[in-house]
Image: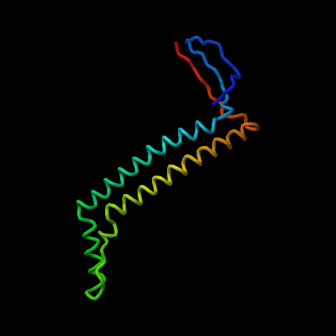
Amino acid sequence: MSGTSTESAPTTGTGTRQARLYLTRLDPWTVMKTAFVLSIGLAIVMLVATFLLWMLLTVTGTFESINSTVNDLGGSGAAGVDVAGALSFGRIMGFALLLAAFEIVLTSALATVTAAIYNVTTGFTGGVEVTLSEDH
């Protein structure tokens, strides 16, 4: 990231210096690395939340209740539907892992493209103005 200083205010009576800077460029490689690391953290949170939710539903007997309800609604002639088998731990965590991998790739790519678009648009927008201040 780079910025250019446009104005520096002198020290005020309270001892605070301020500088107004414009963020004129984002390095796409740095943005991609940062987005990648943050999206890995988000993927880990998503996997842990999926595990905890699956465990909660298993311990409370929700899957068995759904199985029982579906089989009761189907009648005695219907083939037994195994909802608990369809929502097994391996399938649910596999789907969550696939979704997490997709989220990592998509987030990293979108952040990089957004940084490149920002770099193109700063030519006519001037960038984002940031005011920095220093207290003594």
Q: Residue at x 58, y 36 (%)?
A: 30
Q: How many marks?
A: 0
Which of these two is toward me, 78 or 30?
30
Residue 68 or 87: which is nearer the viewer?
A: 87
Q: Which x, y percent locates residue 18? A: 61, 19
Nearest the eye: 29 or 78? 29
Q: Is residue 24 above or below residue 135?
A: below
* Residue located farthest toward the right when viewing the structure as drawn: 124
Q: Residue at x 28, y 88 (%)?
A: 77
Q: Is residue 14 above or below residue 101?
A: above
* Residue extending furthest toward the bottom: 77
- Asked if residue 51 is positioned above or below residue 25 in the image, the reply reads below
Q: Quadrant of residue 75?
A: bottom left
Tell me residue 9's x, y (percent): 66, 16
Asked which colour scheme the image uses, the reply is rainbow
Counting from the top left corner in percent of width and height, residue 20 is at 65, 24
Quarter of the figure that contains the N terminus: top right
Q: Residue at x 31, y 58 (%)?
A: 54
Side (left or right) of 47 relative to 56? right
- Identify the residue at horizontal 61%, vertical 44% (top origin): 112
Question: Which percent across, then down, holds residue 55?
Answer: 28, 57
User: To which quarter of the image does residue 63 belong?
Assistant: bottom left
